[in-house]
């Protein structure tokens, strides 16, 4: 990897590795906020709330509602199929 910003593929790999070490799970969902993909990390034994219960960032909830902001760790416009660093 170079000194440039890591690609989203590698960022997601790091998020997954850290979550695995901490006994957590990683979920990705298509984002309706700006397109792209939202990344959520959820402790084992807990479930990611259904999409209908999660309010993405908006004027009323700049960081999303509690269900969204509790688990949200990243937003990625695109996630490649391989490293692009």
Image (cartoon, rainbow, N blue to C red):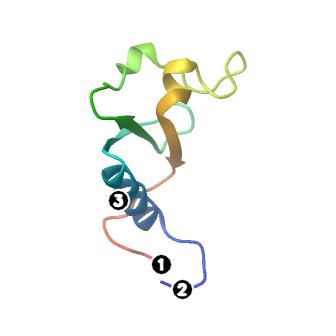
Element type at marker 2? loop
Q: Which mark is residue 85?
A: 1
Element type at marker 1? loop
Q: Residue at (45%, 55%) from the top-left corner? A: 78
Mark 2 and mark 3: Cα distance apart in space: 20 Å
The part of the image, by quadrant, that contains residue 60 is top right
The residue that mark 2 highlights is 2
Give above or below for 18 relative to 39. below
Q: Residues within 10 Å of mark 1 (few under 14, many from 20)?
A: few
Give above or below for 3 relative to 71. below
Contact, mark 2 vs mark 3 (Cβ under 8 Å):
no
Q: Which mark lies nearer to you, 2 or 3?
A: 3
Mark 3 and mark 1: Cα distance apart in space: 18 Å
Percent of width and height locating residue 12: 41, 57
The residue that mark 3 highlights is 17
Give above or below for 18 relative to 2. above
Percent of width and height locating residue 8: 46, 62
Contact, mark 1 vs mark 2 (Cβ under 8 Å):
yes
Q: Quick one: 84 or 45, which is closer to the camera?
A: 45
> Counting residues from the N terminus, which is met first, the one under dot 3 or under dot 1?
3
């Amino acid at each position: 990897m170079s000194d440039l910003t890591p690609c989203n593929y590698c960022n997601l790999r790091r998020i997954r590795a850290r979550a695995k070490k901490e006994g957590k799970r990683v979920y990705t969902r298509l984002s309706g906020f700006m397109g792209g993909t939202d990344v959520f990390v959820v402790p084992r034994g807990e479930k990611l709330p259904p999409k209908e219960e999660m309010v993405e960032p908006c004027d009323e909830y700049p960081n999303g509602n509690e269900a969204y902001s509790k688990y949200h760790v990243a937003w990625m416009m695109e996630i490649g199929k391989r490293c692009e660093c």
